């Protein structure tokens, strides 16, 4: 047994301290930003289907709202801890700030396991959660979103309760709604496209034409699929895609050196991003082992599946041809591998920035709700492009100017923007 | 003087009037005497008349009625006569006449006074009325008399019987004597002697034991039957006697059935004939007394269904004789058959009757159907073997299992090449005519199968037939399927299973069920809308809120094979009927990942059973699929929606099989609960059923007892167990029980197993487990392995073993280690699981990556591995299979596994954990 259990909030604070040191923030600013600005802990009594009442514990943490309404998910988790919620709320503050969205950071949740709850009981929890805290939520205060074990259905129940309590239609109260009830088009594409927009900008800076590049992807789920799609539209050539095979219980890399055919591959892919092995073989794809994707002679690597995929052990397999690694997944690179990649002078677009297309689209959902006017998908994606490009350039410029890692640059920009807002408001 | 004379006259006249009145009174008095007959009355009147007239000395009277003359004595009829007619109903029927024999002075009417005229008229009137009254009275009396005669109609019956059916009269008389005697009627005792020579008042039977009793000859008895009914008449009402006689005659008509059933030599054909006769007699008022009804239905149950006491006991409360008629119509049997239908058929028949009778109490049990089914009796298999001289095959079961396994493919061929008895072919042909061109399933229904406590679940084959084409083709295909099912009796698994349950020496007689497949045509396929299995007790709890009593349903689209069989590549939808809102899968991703993707169907074009993709079926024929909007949900931009009743575009919409509409909008769940409750209540123990639904009706396909061992007591799990004494702990899907004294652990390391690079080595792991199963001490070892034990499809998901390769273990443990982004699905299979329950092999899932669980991988991997020592040929698998001798490794301690379902906690500890405290 470890003497001291891992505390996510302390880890997040440590990360912040590092940025604060570089920014030489004053103590009051540090004290303000190290902790949530508001925390709500409350009880949600629920009349269960069997007539008995059960008491659930709910939270909402608003880490910082200096730049705008707090934004962040609501999690249903049986082993939720307040420190996890605090860490995630802080993370949201930085994420909205690096994209320069007029939003703060928040997170919330309920300690429960939906596997032991009926839909009706879940609905009561959602409504109870809103009733307890609706005075401190709202389109201009704090905007919840789906998270672990919550989805569009839960968002609708929460919205309905909020609108009932406030007596007005307010779809901007929450994001992650179905398209038919105030959701935004382009959400599915947003993260994958966002990744590729940053890659495009990076290539521009390197004076490389996308059509002269090749790429290898890990993962073929939602993020990777749209990233591949956009990359091909840009003229790039994807030569391999790695993904999990449920039947065999292992991953394979599917390679076609002359370039994969996106439409063809998507037709033999299940909804979880699994490619049918035999059909792929029939279509002329080579089946390589799991780590095949990382060893390809390509310009761009896009890990878009899981955490800790580029490690000290396999980092050496990365070919010299690789110029850019764009982190489509959260935390795909381990710290030690990150050091080695820097030494190799491979340009990394950090997850923080690369996969922020999702939260940007959530912001667009809210914007459309608030004006009660909805954009076509093209408009959403065009605006996404503008936001992502601007965010990328800011980070990239900062990193180049100050000769620091893009990862650090993104963090510093985010913390600086929030600190500045607090200062301008006269909080510190 | 004048005055005196007139006074005298008045006095005289008054005297006359008094005489007249006196006469009238006397006549009246006579007429009021009911006991006098007409003659006496007439004579009386004649006597009473003369004193009433003025000159009594010379006065005579007579009466004529209907030509008869009444007069007291002869006298000459003179001219001095006064007469009055007797009139009844306006008809003159006679007259009253008064004479003076001598002349007298003239008065008002000759010598007669006018008052005397009045008097004679009055007498005649009165007499007329009297006659009328008498006539009416006799009519009424006659009426009454005829009524009386009708009430003793029973005498007529007795008379009739005496002349037409003396034997029946003797039986009836005998029953009457018995009845009277039971009623404690003294006179009956005496009459008893006529029937029962053994019964003699005061005689000591034992003294005469060697002397044959003189048998009463029936003619005597005919005579005494009169005496018997005379006694009866004294003690019973006419109505009672009549009722008893009628009842006994009716019952006597069913005695042929009693005789047939009591005779153990009577064949199924004879029994069938008798039931048919009974059926045709029933509308003519053939009724059975409750005790007779019960005894007949028990006899039929035992002859046709099963001898099992528990079953018979339930059946006798439920099944009536008439219920057998439709059953026997559909039984195919060899000549002179003494076979039965077997467990599956018996279970289904009983369940059908239970539900039929439960309909009154619960409307939900209405309209539960049973598919059209024909049966071949259990001796059909011997008939086939005898007909083809295959008797040697019976010895198969005494051979070594390995040999049985090797020879099995040949046995199948032998059976398939056998010829059927023409009698059976005739029956099958009839059955095919009855079914028509509808798909069929041929199922086994062995006498040993499905009995309480011995589920041969899935050991024998069931085969689907498209049953399309010419009669000849269909017949050939049907016989082929039956032969194959027969052959499966001699397969290695059933033989092994029977050996283990000491059932080897019993004849494994195999009944066959030929059942219409429930379903509808969808495109070129035939399938039920959905089907599944349901258990009245839930042994697969996925939430602590689900109780065992909440039951379990495994639901699939199409044929139920996918719900019954273990699936390695797909998932049925699980529902706990008591808690239908608590679903196994919650998030959209889970719901989609664990939803059924494939469907079993009968392809009517290729005439084969096929497994196809649900997606492609619905894309092509979605609009034809019955009730589809209740079975699927639509995924719209990551939002799960109800499917609309019309207008779902199966090509464009993403859909997922959830059964949401079925569960939330229909009576389906309530119906399942009602069925399970009614059957469980009547059976007196947990049961499971198979069912199918064609979109319109719920069909019951099978019902049997779900059996449990008595080891389901919750184990006490001490608090603060020392961690170093724990091998593993678990907190999900825990059942109750305690397993002690485990000396060996067989551990298949999930990591190393998944790293095996070729199929051959993976299969070898299964073989090695099978060998270990033979050499390790029975019920003293536990098996721990990755994923799904007994995985039949993709063996990467789990070690490929059949039940006979694990049947000696005490516990089967499945490990779900998180692999990349998913946790492998553990075996929620039923067939295997039921085998484990039957054999009292416990099942436990382990989730070592769950927080709070202990999993001592170090001990399992690094303890001394005795595999190379005990099975040198499998030494090359030492890295994958670890066999640990627990006492040798743990200072003499053995392993104990404590399980407590209510706290959802299980722990495996060394038996010496107490000592370290």
Image (cartoon, rainbow, N blue to C red):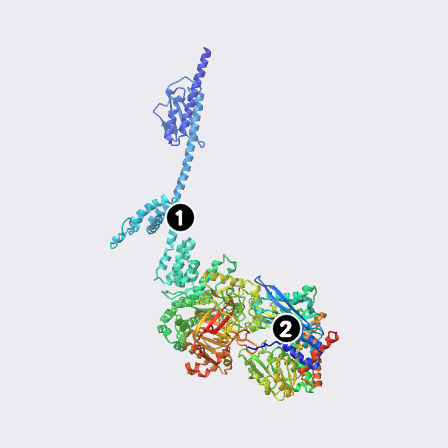
Q: Quadrant of the N terminus of chain B?
A: top left
Task: Residue B404: give x, y in percent of width and height.
Answer: 39, 76
Residue A279 higher or lower than B466, as above or below:
below
Residue holding disc 2: A85
Left-right relation of A238 to B572: right
Where does label 1 land, which residue?
Answer: B243
**To which quarter of the image does residue B424 belong?**
bottom left
Say which residue appears at 52% left-offset and 60% top-offset: B364
Q: How many numbered marks, from 0 up?
A: 2
Where is residue A243, by image quadrant?
bottom right
Secondary element at image label 1: helix
Q: Are marks 2 and 1 in contact (CB under 8 Å)?
A: no
Residue B633 visible in image: yes
Q: Is residue B731 above or below residue B219?
A: below
Viewer-closest of A305 and B666: A305
Q: Give the side of residue B797 with respect to residue B141, left or right.
A: right
Residue A332, position as x, y percentages in the image: 61, 81
Instruction: Answer yes or no: is residue B832 visible.
Output: no
Find residue B329 and report its horizontal and vertical position in percent.
Answer: 42, 62
């Amino acid at each position: 047994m470890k003497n001291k259990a891992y505390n996510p909030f302390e880890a997040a604070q440590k990360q912040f301290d590092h940025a604060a040191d570089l920014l030489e923030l004053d103590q009051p600013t540090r004290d303000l930003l190290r902790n949530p600005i508001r925390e709500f802990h409350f009880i949600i009594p629920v009349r269960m289907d069997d007539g008995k009442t059960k008491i659930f514990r709910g939270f909402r943490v608003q880490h910082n709202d200096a730049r705008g309404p707090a934004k962040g998910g609501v999690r249903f988790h049986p082993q939720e801890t307040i420190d996890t919620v605090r860490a995630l709320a802080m993370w949201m503050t930085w994420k909205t700030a690096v994209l320069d969205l007029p939003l703060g950071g928040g997170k919330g949740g309920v300690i429960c396991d939906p596997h032991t709850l009926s839909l009706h009981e879940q609905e009561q929890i959602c409504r109870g959660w809103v009733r307890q805290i609706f005075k401190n939520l709202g389109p201009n205060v704090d905007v919840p979103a789906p998270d672990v074990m919550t989805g569009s259905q839960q968002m609708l129940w929460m919205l309905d309760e909020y609108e009932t309590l406030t007596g007005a239609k307010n779809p901007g109260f929450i994001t992650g709604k179905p398209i038919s009830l105030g959701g935004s088009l382009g959400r599915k594409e947003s993260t994958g496209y966002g990744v590729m927009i940053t890659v495009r900008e990076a290539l521009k800076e390197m004076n490389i034409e996308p059509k002269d590049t090749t790429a290898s992807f890990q993962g073929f789920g939602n993020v990777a699929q749209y990233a591949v799609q956009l990359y091909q539209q840009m003229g790039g050539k994807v030569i391999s895609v790695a993904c999990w095979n449920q039947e065999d219980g292992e991953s394979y890399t599917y390679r076609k050196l002359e370039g994969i055919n996106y439409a063809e591959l998507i037709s033999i892919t299940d909804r979880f991003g699994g490619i049918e092995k035999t059909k792929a073989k029939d279509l002329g794809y080579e089946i390589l082992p799991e780590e095949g994707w990382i060893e390809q002679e390509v310009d761009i690597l896009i890990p878009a599946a899981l955490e800790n995929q580029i490690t000290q052990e396999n980092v050496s397999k990365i070919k010299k041809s690789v110029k850019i690694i764009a982190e489509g997944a959260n935390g795909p690179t381990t710290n030690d591998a990150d050091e080695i990649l820097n030494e190799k002078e491979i340009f990394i677009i950090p997850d923080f920035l690369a996969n922020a297309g999702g939260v940007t689209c959530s912001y667009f959902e809210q914007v459309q709700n608030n004006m009660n006017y909805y954009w076509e998908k093209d408009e959403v994606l065009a605006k996404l492009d503008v936001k992502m490009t601007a965010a990328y350039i800011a980070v990239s410029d900062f990193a180049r100017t100050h000769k620091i890692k893009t990862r650090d640059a993104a963090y510093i920009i985010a913390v600086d923007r929030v600190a500045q807002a607090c200062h301008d408001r006269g909080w510190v | 003087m004048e005055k005196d004379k007139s006074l005298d006259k008045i006095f005289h006249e008054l005297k006359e009037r008094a005489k007249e009145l006196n006469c009238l009174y006397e006549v009246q008095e006579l007429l009021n005497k009911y006991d006098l007959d007409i003659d006496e009355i007439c004579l009386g009147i004649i006597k009473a008349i003369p004193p009433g007239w003025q000159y009594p000395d010379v006065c005579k009277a007579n009466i004529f009625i209907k030509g008869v003359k009444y007069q007291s004595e002869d006298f000459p009829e003179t001219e001095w006569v006064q007469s009055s007619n007797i009139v009844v109903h306006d008809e003159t029927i006679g007259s009253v006449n008064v004479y003076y024999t001598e002349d007298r002075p003239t008065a008002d009417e000759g010598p007669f006074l006018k008052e005397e005229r009045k008097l004679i008229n009055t007498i005649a009137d009165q007499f007329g009325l009297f006659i009328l009254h008498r006539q009416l009275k006799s009519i009424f009396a006659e009426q009454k008399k005829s009524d009386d005669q009708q009430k003793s109609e029973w005498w007529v019956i007795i008379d009739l019987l005496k002349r037409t059916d003396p034997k029946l009269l003797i039986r009836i008389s005998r029953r009457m004597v018995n009845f009277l005697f039971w009623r404690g009627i003294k006179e009956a005792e005496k009459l008893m002697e006529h029937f029962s020579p053994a019964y003699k008042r005061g005689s000591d039977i034992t003294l005469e034991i060697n002397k044959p009793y003189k048998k009463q000859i029936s003619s005597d008895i005919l005579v005494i039957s009169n005496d018997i009914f005379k006694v009866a008449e004294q003690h019973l009402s006419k109505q009672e006697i009549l009722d008893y006689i009628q009842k006994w005659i009716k019952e006597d008509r069913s005695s042929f059935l009693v005789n047939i059933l009591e005779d153990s030599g009577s064949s199924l054909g004879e029994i069938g004939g008798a039931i048919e006769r009974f059926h045709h007699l029933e509308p003519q008022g053939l009724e059975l007394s409750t005790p007779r009804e019960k005894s007949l239905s028990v006899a039929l149950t035992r002859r046709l269904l099963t001898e099992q006491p528990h079953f018979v006991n339930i059946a006798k409360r439920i099944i009536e004789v008439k219920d057998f008629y439709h059953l026997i119509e559909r039984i195919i049997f060899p000549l002179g058959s003494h076979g039965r239908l077997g467990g599956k058929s018996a279970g289904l028949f009983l369940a059908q009757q239970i539900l039929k009778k439960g309909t009154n109490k619960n409307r939900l049990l209405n309209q539960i159907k049973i598919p059209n089914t024909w049966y071949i009796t259990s001796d059909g298999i011997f008939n086939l073997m005898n007909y083809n001289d295959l008797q040697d095959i019976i010895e198969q079961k005494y051979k070594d299992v390995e040999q049985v396994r090797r020879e099995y493919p040949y046995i199948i061929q032998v059976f398939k090449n056998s010829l059927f008895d023409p009698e059976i072919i005739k029956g099958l042909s009839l059955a095919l005519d009855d079914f028509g061109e509808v798909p069929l399933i041929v199922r086994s229904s062995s006498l040993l199968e499905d009995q309480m406590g011995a589920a041969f679940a899935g050991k024998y084959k069931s085969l689907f037939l498209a049953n399309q084409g010419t009669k000849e083709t269909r017949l050939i295909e049907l016989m082929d399927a039956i032969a194959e099912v027969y052959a499966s009796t001699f397969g290695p698994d059933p033989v092994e299973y029977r050996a283990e349950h000491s059932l080897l020496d019993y004849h494994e007689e195999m009944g066959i069920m030929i059942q219409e497949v429930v379903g509808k045509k969808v495109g070129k396929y035939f399938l039920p809308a959905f089907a599944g299995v349901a258990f009245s007790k839930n042994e697969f709890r996925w939430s602590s809120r689900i109780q065992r009593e909440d039951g379990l349903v495994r639901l699939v689209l199409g044929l139920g094979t996918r719900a019954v069989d273990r699936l390695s590549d797909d998932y049925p939808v699980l529902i706990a009927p008591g808690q239908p809102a608590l679903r196994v899968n919650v998030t959209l991703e889970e719901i989609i990942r664990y939803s059924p993707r494939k469907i079993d169907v009968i392809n009517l074009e290729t005439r084969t059973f096929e497994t196809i993709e649900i997606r492609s079926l619905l894309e092509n024929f979605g609009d034809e699929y019955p009730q589809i909007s209740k079975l699927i949900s639509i995924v719209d931009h990551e939002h799960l929606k109800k499917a609309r009743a019309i207008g779902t575009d199966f090509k464009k919409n993403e859909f997922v099989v959830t059964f949401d509409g079925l569960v939330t909008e229909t009576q389906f769940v309530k119906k399942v609960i009602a069925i399970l409750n009614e059957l469980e209540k009547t059976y007196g123990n947990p049961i499971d059923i198979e069912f199918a639904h064609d979109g319109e009706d719920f069909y019951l396909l099978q019902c049997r007892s779900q059996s449990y061992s008595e080891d389901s007591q919750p184990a006490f799990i001490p608090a603060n167990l020392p961690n170093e004494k724990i091998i593993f702990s678990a907190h999900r899907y825990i059942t109750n029980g305690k397993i002690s004294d485990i000396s060996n652990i067989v551990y298949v390391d999930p990591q190393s197993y998944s790293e095996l690079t070729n199929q051959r080595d993976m299969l070898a792991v299964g073989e090695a487990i099978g060998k270990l199963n033979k050499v390790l001490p029975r019920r003293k070892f536990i098996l721990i392995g990755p994923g799904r034990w007994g995985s039949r499809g993709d063996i990467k998901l789990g070690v490929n073993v059949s039940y006979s390769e694990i049947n000696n273990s005490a516990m089967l443990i499945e490990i779900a280690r998180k692999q990349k982004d998913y946790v492998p699905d553990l075996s929620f299979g039923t067939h295997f699981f039921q085998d484990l329950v039957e054999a009292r092999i416990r099942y436990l899932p382990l989730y070592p990556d769950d927080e709070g669980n202990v999993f001592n991988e170090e001990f399992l991997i690094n303890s001394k591995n005795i595999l190379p020592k005990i099975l040198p040929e499998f030494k090359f698998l030492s890295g994958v299979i670890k066999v640990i001798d627990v006492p040798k490794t743990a200072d003499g301690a053995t392993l104990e596994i404590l399980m407590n379902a209510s706290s959802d906690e299980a722990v495996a500890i060394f038996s010496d954990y107490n000592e370290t405290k």
